[in-house]
Amino acid sequence: MVSNTKEVALEQAIQRRLTGLTTEELAGQPAPEGHGPFRVGLPSDFDAEYALDTRLFWEFLETTQGKELAKLKARNPGDWQRKILERFDRLIKKNGVLHLLKKGLNVDDAFFALMYPAPLASSAAKVHENFAANILSVTRQVRYSQTNPGEEIDMVLFVNGLPLITIELKNAWTGQTARYHGQKQYRTGRDATQPLLQFGRALVHMAVDTDEVFMTTKLAGPATFFLPFNKGHNEGEGNPPNPNGHKTAYLWEEVFTKEGLAGIIQHFVLLEGKATDPLAKKTLIFPRYHQLEVVRRLLTHAATTGVGHSYLIQHSAGSGKSNSITWTAYQLIETYPAKAGIPGAKGLDQPLFDSVIVVTDRRLLDKQLRENIKDFSEVKNIVAPAMRSADLKSALENGKKIIITTIQKFPFIIDGIADLSDKRFAVIIDEAHSGQSGLAHDKMNQAMGAGGQDPDEDDPQDRILAAMQARKMRGNASYFAFTATPKNTTLEKFGERQADGSFKPFHLYSMKQAIEEGFILNMLANYTTYKSYYEIQKSIADNPLFDTKKAQKKLRAYVERSQQTINTKAEIMLDHFVEQVVTPKKLRGKAKGMIVTQNIESAIRYYRAVTKLLAERGNPFKALIAFSGEKTVDGVTYTEAEINGFAEADTRDRFEDDDYRLLVVANKYLTGFDQPKLTTMYVDKKLQHVLAVQALSRLNRSANKLGKRTEDLFILDFFNDVEDIKAAFDPFYTVTTLSSATDVNVLHELKESLDQVGVYEWQEVEEFVARYFAGEDAQALSPVIDMAADRFNNQLELTDKDKIDLKIKARQFVKIYGQMAAIMPFEVVDWEKLFWFLKFLVPKLQIKDPDQDMLDELLEAVDLSSYGLERTKLNHTIGLDASGSELDPQNPNPRGYRDGDPVKDPLDEIIRSFNERWFQGWSATPEEQRVKFINVVNSIRSHPDYTEKYEANTDPYNRGLALEKMLQDVMLKRRKEELELYKLFASDPAFKSAWSQSIEKVLMERV
């Protein structure tokens, strides 16, 4: 006899674990009690109209609340059950099952608890007895549909007859997966209009196989959105091997327990939305596995080890930190010591912590905490702000259990904790979302005589540590630090010390896992660096000696901050943004960009350049600037509010408006700024270490409603090398290999290979594209695609290997062209046409066993080969190392002036070497450049359009267009004698822009 590896075997394994028996073993006989924590439910007891296991529903009420039932039986002897069911049905349709499980059911003068809550350590014996009376059950093959009585859900979990979780089971060993088939079954094979599957009637719907679990709280047909409920493996998606069974056994062994499910219902599941909103407009939040795990681990550790510990929770963006912090804060209030005598314990019947302090700069978290506490706690007003140590004392005296403060006010709260030594505190630090409020720090700097520094530059982790290290910490507080990017000092302060002396986070949810699970996008998938070229000429006659390194650095800084250089870069940025983001209407016309500059002065200069260029184009959209404090540039003092025209506090909200598409920053908003519409970033600033990760991660927020995809993201970097960015991300973000920029000539080769097979005729590609862009009905497009697909699938009789080869090439073509089209300095129309044709054809190309994920993984794994579009451009997908990274502690050695003679060169030599390094695009000598430049200027002045369309034209926008056309004409005429100059002009946007601006400057002097 061989092993049973069919789907039913998985059903039986789960049922046996939960009940101690299987339906097959019972053979139709009633199940005896006491074999397991769950009872065996019978499909015949399920009422599809009310979505209830009526036998267990009535058994629970009769057994536990007979007196309340008697009230209704006495007055309604013939139809008391109908009366209860109708009232139940009306309220569950209005409020959902979560509300009824928590609040119970009122019928006339009777009240029924529909689930008894799990007891606390201080609860009376009656509370323990009531909780034990809850009936958990599991029913297989539930016939849920009133219209199609034969349709079945594989498994449903109930409490007291009310459905909690529906489950569709699949078995990878039989070629069926939860990731594909289970989700598809819920989306297209299950009727979500039936009571059991209506929103709010069950807490969650799960697709489960032996390897993975996926969940959703709202079934919406094909639009249903599933989230993974997996542990993660190798800091990525999926689940680790289980030496004792299936990879997903944690679901029925750890999660589906009586206490576990009660805890999820009481302390985790949230129904978000306005009180006045109908149920259908609300959102039901069920915790993801890592959220459930981290909160439970923190609570268990605190309960067993007491007060005085520090915890580092390294959770990436996309981990749902707001909810994790909310759940942790609320449940820490009700955490009791597991045993007497642990540090901070005042007794087994008293909570371990008097108060929970949440340190955050996230405005939404304050609101979220207040609203969610209403759902969890019988006592409503237990949340209060505290900005001074006196506020902390006052809040405690007024019975406030959760106290919210900011990172700026944290030092005062630390003082208050020390003063209140008889109290016990849990301090939750939400470090990662700060970086918008440096004004108080700036004023302190000015008072101390340390002006001139960007107040937003101060690192929030450093501020937290400074506040803690400046004071002797008492044992009356535990610290829970949430961050995506812990520095070495943060690890040392909050991390868990290992036996070998190293420090590790208490809990990890990595960026790799967040990206693989689809909660954030890979912002490094389309990274382009822009090499700067300069030509510096000596303006003094003598030739003094300079320290070479310092001189080179100073020369670069000089060029970078000049308005002319900034104007050139701003034009390149705006050209790209308009052509590749605004005009194609990315994110349905709502996509936004951020310009990251070196400092506040640069930010102001960039803002001036961008607004001037926008004005010349008729102001198609607006830009904003963000910085703290005041800054004087060219003798004028600026503030953010004065430039933008409204209060600094409104910038974040105003940027949400569709009118504003670009935000210019120096350091402000580089951390803690969640704007899902951001798709594009232009970087002109040195980014390294934590700042690089935090800044570039502004792009990774998903926006499913706007269809935001990884292909929509684009970073144009004028300052950093790809290697530097990779080095910054590796410690915090683990993925696979570095896939360098793409040789676009591979598209020629791919097209040639695809053309030769004969799956499509070129006139079919032409016809499809013409019809598609003419907006014809999809029915007119299908025959063209279907004909080509049928050749591939049947007529050409291709071997399986040939089919796989062609599909890989087609997918590679779509992938590479999709990434490169945004930055190629030329157009190949045939590539564009084939891209759109293949985009619709590829999904219809059938290969052997198409339902398996293996091929898709293979296709997605196609690497891009190395290529630089121009010598100034590198388009990279930056892959990161999957191995864990180890940071070094701070250098213990004292620092000072380093001895040794600096290398000194004459100024001429420094300028020469600088130009060699930064201006390699043109071999002409400076004098030759000058002659060529003057010749071009004279040719423009001789152009027939010069006087009428340029010199006499008062409209700056039209004058600019005229100059662009004249310059193009002149350069075309001179291309034979000035081939090198023409190549630079035609293929290098940076050179063209600088060249054009310089010519315009000379012409304007005369105009």
Image (spheres, grey):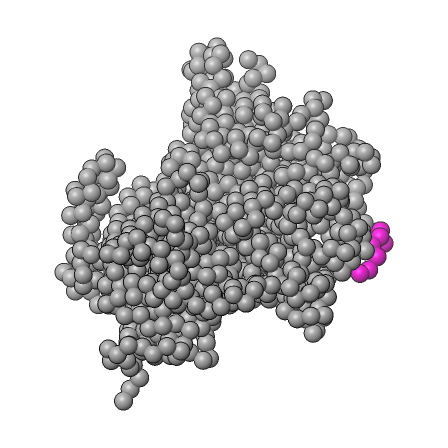
Rendered image quadrant of residue 487 = bottom right
Q: With respect to residue 2, does 519 lie above or below?
A: above
In the rendered image, the residue lying farthest to the bottom is 1
Residue 102 lies, in percent from the top left, at 45, 54
Instruction: Report the span colored magenta.
Output: 891-901
Residue 229 lies, in percent from the top left, at 43, 62
Q: With respect to residue 363, does 488 lie above or below?
A: below
Q: Quadrant of the N terminus?
A: bottom left
The residue depicted at 40 percent of the width and 78 percent of the height is 34
The residue depicted at 61 percent of the width and 30 percent of the height is 648
Most foreground residue, 577 or 760:
577
Q: With respect to residue 370, does 789 lie above or below?
A: below
Q: Is residue 899 part of the magenta span, yes or no?
A: yes
Left or right: 509, with 586 as reference point = right
The residue depicted at 44 percent of the width and 14 percent of the height is 949
Left or right: 443, with 846 as reference point = right
Residue 353 shows in the view: yes
Magenta segment's dominant SS is: loop
Rendered image quadrant of residue 567 = top right
Residue 717 lies, in percent from the top left, at 55, 43
The residue depicted at 65 percent of the width and 60 percent of the height is 351
Q: Quadrant of the C terminus?
A: top right
Most foreground residue, 412 or 854:
412
Most foreground residue, 492 or 45:
45
In the rendered image, the residue lying farthest to the front is 74
Most foreground residue, 212 or 907:
212
